[in-house]
Image: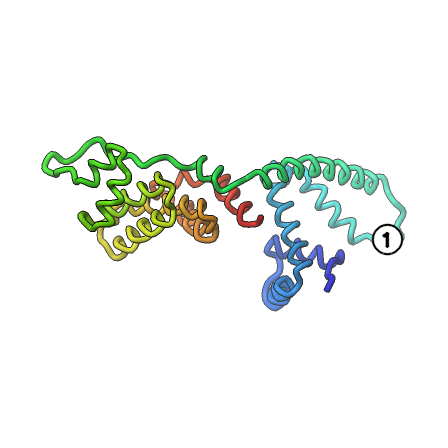
Amino acid sequence: MNNSTPDMNELLVQYLDGEIQGEEKNNLEQQLAADAALQQQYDSLLLTRESIRYYGLQQKVASIHQEMMNEMQIAPVKPISNSRRTLRYALSVAASLLLLVGGYIAYQFFTLSPDKVFSANYQPYELSSTRDINTTETATEKAYRAGNYKEVIRIYSAKEETGVKAAFLSGVSAMQSKDFTSAINNFTAVLDMNKGAAVKTLNDDAEYYLALSYIHTRDYDYALELMDKIKQDPAHTYHSKVTKKMIRQVKMLKWR
């Protein structure tokens, strides 16, 4: 089925802008689910819109878009006016700009990798240098501070030390050892132990490092869910680290 018509294209734009609701929206979503070509057309429009927003072209083409909408309401038999010639020229300029931007976006899109996004946002976790004088440093903490990540993992795996901190340090040690499956399991264990707890120990840290682990294993939906949660919470320890650029890059990885 081929739904690529001017009317359908405009309907997709309205859908992107959130201008259609109810039954019309449901019908369109059913068409998208059933028609791969239409879905591809929608994805192209979505990527174009994100590109325009990212490179600051939205304001430049906003007035052109409005003129274009007005133009669509004019009868086709009306002679071409100077304003319409100007519009066509402006659209040509906008198209040229989008072509240049599109080329750069395409380069960024196809050279982007999970390793690049991970490396750009990952920093090894550092234990606090200050400790309560009445608290003895655990074997897990000593091993982690010494950079002996295999020993940290061994201690936790052997259940010689348990609890939130041991699970978390074992998780970041697994990341250092490139064992992201174990890291995910350990960070998930931290979040599970914190459920219902009055004080959630290392919960923010576990969420951020879990999101990074999911990026590395290409589980982008899980990563985005955590990143959105962190971004929407100004009080989150890693709120400032989850940037719009980071979220956008993970979405691009998901689209590929």
Asked if 186 appears above or below 111 in the picture, the reply is below
Residue closer to the observer: 80 or 167: 167
Left or right of residue 227, residue 200 in this image: left
Q: Position of residue 75 (x, y in %)?
A: 84, 54
Left or right of residue 230, residue 150 in this image: left
Disc 1, SS = loop
Q: Position of residue 146 (x, y in %)?
A: 24, 32
Instruction: Please name the residue shown 66% across and 39% down the image.
Output: 102
Q: Position of residue 188 (x, y in %)?
A: 33, 52
Q: Position of residue 97 (x, y in %)?
A: 70, 35
Left or right of residue 196, residue 62 in this image: right
Q: Mark 1 packing: few (<14 Cα in 10 Å), some, or many (20+)?
A: few
Quadrant assignment, res 240: top left
Instruction: Please name the residue shown 37% across and 45% down the image.
Output: 179
Residue closer to the observer: 71 or 99: 99
Instruction: Please name the residue shown 59% across and 63% down the image.
Output: 21
Instruction: Please name the residue shown 32% across and 49% down the image.
Output: 187
Dot 1 amino acid type: Pro
Label 1 sits on residue: 76
**The residue positioned farthest toward the left in the image shown:** 134
Rendered image coloring scheme: rainbow
Q: How many marks?
A: 1
Left or right of residue 45, residue 208 in this image: left
Asked if 98 appears above or below 69 in the picture, the reply is above
Instruction: Identify the image quadrant of the N terminus.
Output: bottom right
Quadrant assignment, res 127: top left
Asked if 216 appears above or below 25 in the picture, the reply is above
